[in-house]
Amino acid sequence: MATTVPVPFADLGKASNDLLGKDYPVGQTKFELKTVAPNGVTFNVLGNQDNKSGAIAGELKTKYVDYKNGLTVTESWTTGNLLTTQIELENKVAKGLKLDITGGFLPSEGKKNAKVGVQYKQLGFNSRAYVDLFKGPTFTGDVVVGRDGFLLGGDVAYDVSRGTVSRFAAAAGYTAPEYSVALHANNSFKVFSASYYHRINADLEAGGKAVWDSKAAPAGEGKAAKSPVALEVGAKLYLDRDAFVKAKVNNAGVLGLGYTQALRKGVKVSIAGLFDTTKLNQPAHKLGLSFVFEA
């Protein structure tokens, strides 16, 4: 009998993806400021500057949560003048049911988008369905079932106007307190991946991911040919309660290094770099910096 609610389809393999992808702010300088008002409204300011072009982009986001009524309202405004509003209602109509309406507007181009979604989750079951009203319309749905740590899920997108399935995927995994593994068949079963995550002890984590693109050019066929399988492994080591280092390397010879330090409560800085070990004497490396402030 299932005793927990499984993760959404998009979060299958999340532990491995976070280990290999997060805390590496390479190629840019990032800034994040998060504050919470006495009434619970959250304000979040995000900004980043591309190290190569110098272009600066930002976003202002506010979130209001009414826990008593299960209501969440999120609004954002980007420097590209994109306005977005999301309204969520959870556990109000029925236990485990969440309704979601998201709309966006780009005044400079007159573009609009709107999505209506529903999520239903219970012990051993998690499903989501969305309709993109201005794109197609397109229906997207996914479901995950789980029992005793085993997970099995599927994802599909259907273009209503064309009457065709535009995308489908499947995944399976197993989650235990110390480790997790996941297998994915994405892009209409054209891209396959396997990943794992292992918390070795309280201070050390390790993980890896292998990806095979069945449509990629075989190795040795032309200049654009790549290795048939992309492999990446990484680790995270906590130096103390306020600092950790991360490292990763892939089979293309790209080495990633990162260091994150909590300077004090609510202030965190991260510095990272990607270094192409096959081109050490060339300007092929990327560095980055991230500042996070919370109050």
Image: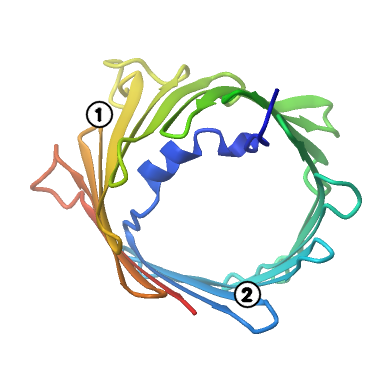
Out of 162 and 181, give the one closest to the viewer: 181
The 10 Å Cα crowd at callout 2, few under 14, some 14 to 19, many 20 or more, is some
Residue 129 position in % (x across, y down):
79, 38
Out of 289 and 283, give the one closest to the viewer: 289
The quadrant of the rendering that contains the N terminus is: top right
Q: Amino acid at mark 1?
A: Asn
Q: Amino acid at mark 2?
A: Thr
Q: CA distance from mark 1 to mark 2?
A: 42 Å
Out of 244 and 163, give the one closest to the viewer: 244
Residue at screen point 17% across, 52% down: 283
Visible in this render: residue 130? no
Q: Quadrant of residue 61?
A: bottom right
Residue 78 position in % (x across, y down):
60, 71
Tell me the residue that label 1 is attached to: 251
Residue 177 position in % (x across, y down):
46, 34
The 10 Å Cα crowd at callout 1, few under 14, some 14 to 19, many 20 or more, is few
Left/right placement of residue 23 relative to residue 129 reads: left
Q: Closer to the camera: disc 1 or disc 2?
A: 2
The disc placed on residue 42 is: 2
